[in-house]
Amino acid sequence: MTWGFVTCGPNEALVVSGCCYAKPLLVPGGRAFVWPTIQCVQRISLNTMTLQVDSPTVYTSQGVPISVTGIAQVKIQGQNEEMLLAACEQFLGKSESEIQHIALVTLEGHQRAIMGSMTVEEIYKDRKKFSKQVFEVASSDLVNMGITVVSYTLKDIRDEELKGYLKSLGMARTAEVKRDARIGEAEARRDAQIKEAIAEEERMASRFLNDIEIAKARRDFELKKAAYDVEVQTKKAEAELAYELQAAKMKQRIKEEQMEILVVERKQEITVQDQEMQRKEKELIAQVRQPAEAEKFRLEKLAEANRARVVMEAEAEAEAVRIRGEAEAFSMQAKAKAEAEQMKKKADAFREYRQAAIVDMLLDALPKMAAEVAAPLSQAKKITMVSSGNGDVGASKLTGEVLQIVTKVPEMVKVITGVDIMKVNPQHFPDGH
């Protein structure tokens, strides 16, 4: 051997012994300087070894023979110096197969021991517990040899002597599982049906509650709407009543103003009548010179009486305006009588003209009479006319009604005065119309 450095890979370790070392120098995966002749260098493998641990026909605690196959991974621990030194003492100079055999025999012994302390059911049902016990027991022995058990797994369980034992266990378990599955399925179906019934009940309850809330909301809406409608109708009625009241006030005011206008017109008519009387008087004086002074005096007295009557009539008209509606009928009657008396007086005063004078006065009053007849219609706010299908409709019908009333005036004049104005010759009028 030449002197110099010796190296090794990470899967092996160098063991240097001899001069200068009281105990061997262990170098896992590295290098070392070796003196030839006085020092010796050896190698030991640190590879992981996979072992198939077979334990055929092992009697369990119940005396049932079964066979078990386990898989273990072991290796010499190179990082722990004491374990590596123990491995060198045990396996240095041996091949890797020899080391595997020693580890396999040790594991198989511990595996058989654990199988003998457990029942078939325990091994079959709780493989993790079996693997853990084998791993712990084997590790405690192999660690003294410098070997570490990396992992252990139970691979297979067989009952070669008693065929069907494990199968029976499986079938029983399968039956149990199927039974539990059926029970679970039935319970799940039952729970599902119960939950569906509860859900349906809750849904119906929610629906009924929702319907109740909707009904309550609809009821509240209807009540509020009715209250609002009542308030609106009340306000509307108040507005209409206020409008009608205001309209009545306006009508009353208009009527008062019309009465005032009538009073003014009556006063103007009195003034005109006075002037007309004066004119007629002068005309009579100019045209009738032969009448006696007594007749003239009588006519003057009649004129004064007529003037006094007209003044009293105007005062009566003013009084009628003041008391408005209460004395309106009486005023109209007094007015009619006064006008009839006035006409009579005028007829007496102008008896020389006889029928022509009366007709002239009636013709002067005829437009006013027509206006009085149409006055109520002008104040009407609304007129409803119903047609029977014959005759005129609308404004022509209304105008016809007014004209029909006016055409009855000559007949009324004839009844009152005895004069038929329809037969009077226009040439007899004083002004010739």
Image: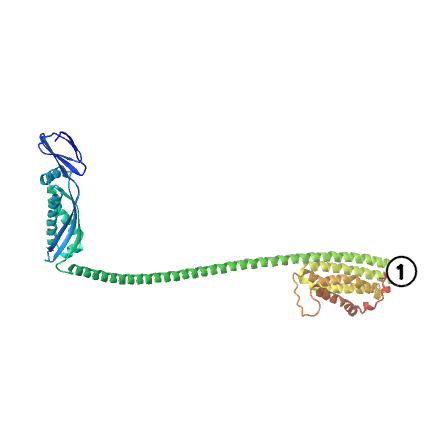
Is residue 314 found left or right of 36 in the rendered image?
A: right
Please give the name of the residue rendered at 11% of the width and 46% of the height, measured from the top-left corner: 101
Residue 217 in sight from this viewpoint = yes
Mark 1 crowd level (few <14, some 14–19, many ≥20, 10 Å Cα):
few
In the depicted structure, whether residue 234 falls above or below residue 74? below
Using the image as rendered, state which of residue 109 and residue 137 is in the foreground. Answer: 109
Residue that badge 1 annotates:
287
In the depicted structure, whether residue 244 falls above or below residue 413? above
The image position of residue 37, as x and y in percent, is: 9, 30
Using the image as rendered, state which of residue 40 and residue 218 is in the foreground. Answer: 40
Residue 273, quarter of picture:
bottom right
Viewport quadrant of the N terminus? top left
The image position of residue 67, as x and y in percent, is: 13, 55
Using the image as rendered, state which of residue 173 and residue 276 is in the foreground. Answer: 173
SS category of the residue bearing label 1: helix
* Number of numbered discs: 1
Question: Please, what is the three-letter code of the amino acid marked with disc 1?
Answer: Gln
Residue 117 in sight from this viewpoint = no
